[in-house]
Amino acid sequence: MDDFVRDTLAQAGLNDLIKVFKDEGIDTETFYMLQDADIEKLIPKMGSRLKFKKLIRRLKAEQTPNESPNHFPTHGHQKGEEETGMTEVLPSTSDTGKRKSGQQLGSKGQPAAKRKCETNSSTETEAKMLNTVRNTMGDIYAMLQDDSDLNKILKTKIKNLETEKKELVGVFGKTGAGKTSLINAVLKEKNLLPSGSVSACTSVMIKVEGNRQNEKYEAEIEFISPEDWEDELGSLLSIIKKGNQETEDNVDDSDEEHHDAADKLSALYEDEWKEKSCEQLMETKYFKEIPEFLCSTSKTLVFESAKDLSTDIVKYTRDAAKNEDYDKIKKWYWPLVKCVTVRVPDNPFLQHVTLVDLPGNGDRNKSRDTMWKGVVGNCSTVWIVSEINRAASDRESWEILKSASNFLGNGGECRYIHFICTKSDVLGDLHDPSPADAQAKILNRNLRAKEAVGKEFNKLNKIKKYFSNECFKVFTVSSAEFLKPKNLKPEDTEIPELQDFLQNLNDSHSVTLNYVSGAQGILSLIQGASLKKVANCYKVVCDDLETNLNCQLDGIRDEMREIYSTFVKCLDEGVETSKSSCKNTLKFFLYPTRKSGSAQYYILKSVVKNGGIHKPKKGKEINFNMKLTSFLNKSIDEEFRKTFPNEGNCGPFNGVINKFSLDTEKLKPKYTDAGLQLTFLKTEEEKIKTKLNKIIRDNKKVIYMSLTKTVEEIMKECYEKAAEFRGKNTLQNIRETIHVYVHNFQNSMFEKAKNVMLDLLLKLMADILGLLEKDMMESIELSLKTEDCTIPDVSTELGMVQKLWEELNSGMDT
């Protein structure tokens, strides 16, 4: 023990600890290295332990973070920590998990342009700041011992400081385009996802996210339900039986469906399905290696390396081509799988980002298709992957984008579309060029590809009504070139630009700032309650705040009324156009040109069997429900995008939610005794706006898709009736059934679709106003009516957090 430790303990009135610290050899250096676990052992008595924790927090807070990183508290030493005292501080909460030393956190700014001023040292400093504040709030939580109403509220607010930021990046592309190779290269995990021959394809959705719990590679397999598979099994066997009977009237689509059904059955049952009934094929013996399927639970596999994971998950993810590895796998389970989630340890690009390898246009299986639509609707970014040699003319890639546009635009939250041209280093048309000539030709070819893709994008009117040119960007990449162990030149590949984009999407600065700001608000509330100064001005402060709140609510209400009136007008016009155009809509759908009679028969049978939707394995989906509502959608598309924008900083409802404020900063000079309470209310404002924006984002998807959903529900009876026809004249009977039903119900159908959308919009508006008023009034009362002498003094903690908050804001402004 040295003089510093002895004097510090004595001055704090902790003389009883001097002998303990002396016996344990605690000097100045080790004093600042004490962790919670060490303190628990050293000081078993609660009273002395709490006093010491408060002392050491104050001493550490007085240190300058940038000068003394070793003085930031941590919860135990992490793997790989240096023994120099320069401890790598890692988040301590369970949902943040462990990160290895040196891992970067995301940078602040719009994903389109990386914030250049942020360096590794600044991200490390922010990580330490975040950890310091988390530890402080954990200690405050422990101090709130009794079960008073105030303590319960404070504990809940401390728990709610942890908010998860998650960005979804959807990756589309046809078979052989190089999706999985691209994902592996961007994540710097060469062997992560299995990538086979050109004829092999991803058969299920694969999510790739960070593993925050441990340093293993994990794969979680989510199966469809046994009931789902039994229904699909019956359908597959029916397709096989029908295909064998209808040889003379076979068409390409029908033939493709037949082969698709046979592939699924053979993958799981080999040749046994040919001689068995549906009931026999559901016997337990076929699923003994995956008991989780029968129990409707997920299966988790754990691996030491990415290569081990890649080898093992093939049977759950791919319809693999028959090659030398095919016979090694006895059972292929991908027909039963809904989704595979791969978790990667210690990856800087996956802290708050999930990459999703998506099948092209959903799935014929209802549960898989529902999940597909949900994931696509939640994507903030979409990558369309195509080989560079035919990117602009790749019809399948553009069709994928067009078919998903409703779920990405007004029915989703997509902000960025990236068209990624792969295999940019391949020059198949050259004969032994020199390295310099080859490089020049590659650069020239890449530029031409970017221009061609950009021109093609500008032709897509349906996409352009949702996404501006600022949302669209073209990349030319070479996954193989990037993974070579050499120093890359900028012209070799643009994968580093994609990595920068992901790093900016992670944006840990906003996560840190939000947490520190929230902590400052809670500490302000606690300290304000302990000082008991607000009583003198409570009434007038409360009156001013309520006046400001009502004024803000009136402004929001007025804006919402105007928006609602505009929607009514647009939808009224849409209903009339839908009615007048219904005859032509039916004609083009029921009697399509350029389709043979057998093709029309096959498509219409598929449509009525599947609730109005025909999903070919390749090509464009046919959705009769969307065709019926196309004029309704068109009538509100522009207003909807304006009201619920995916891009920009304005926010929903023409920005009135984001502009909401009680003007607490203007009230502080007037009511100095209520300064801490007003600081708390400022942070509560930001929290409620974040909460409301999420509610709006989720509900706007439901509102937009309600037009099609309502029509689908109304048409259900028609489809069921039409699906019952068999034998001669089936095609004509289906046509007549649909024609008569739509003619009889068209007036009420379009009116009901309009009214359902308006009701949902009105309910959202009412919920927003009600929640905003309720939450803010509760916060006002909590801050101004709460005075409790049993609340601990947190002035030291508040000072430290305020200092860090100011430093974070200063860094952001810079």
Image (cartoon, rainbow, N blue to C red):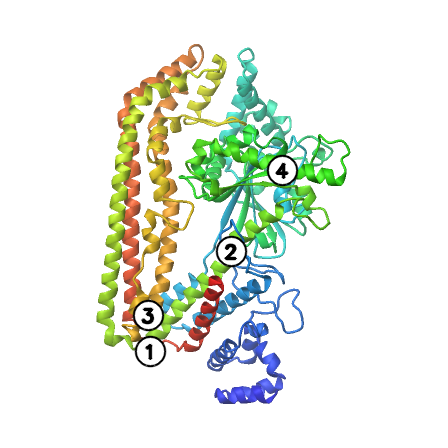
Instruction: Name the residue: 64% across, 64% down.
Output: 79
Closer to the observer: label 1 or label 2? 2
Kindly report the distance in space between the C-alpha atoms of the residues bearing marks 4 and 1. Answer: 67 Å
For label 2, the SS is loop
Kindly report the distance in space between the C-alpha atoms of the residues bearing marks 4 and 2. Answer: 30 Å
Residue located beneath label 2 in the image: 507
| Mark 3 crowdedness (10 Å alpha carbons): few <14, some 14-19, many ≥20 | many
Residue located beneath label 1 in the image: 531
Residue type beneath disc 4: Asn
Residue located beneath label 3 in the image: 677
Is residue 686 toward the left or the right of residue 117 in the image?
left
Q: Nearer the viewer, residue 82 or 473?
A: 473
Closer to the observer: label 3 or label 1? 3
For label 4, the SS is helix
Q: Nearer the viewer, residue 566 or 22?
A: 566
Kindly report the distance in space between the C-alpha atoms of the residues bearing marks 1 and 2. Answer: 37 Å
Q: Disc 1 or 2, which lies upstream in sequence? A: 2
Residue located beneath label 4 in the image: 446
For label 3, the SS is helix
Closer to the observer: label 4 or label 2? 4
Closer to the observer: label 4 or label 1? 4
Residue type beneath disc 3: Gln
Kindly report the distance in space between the C-alpha atoms of the residues bearing marks 3 and 1. Answer: 11 Å
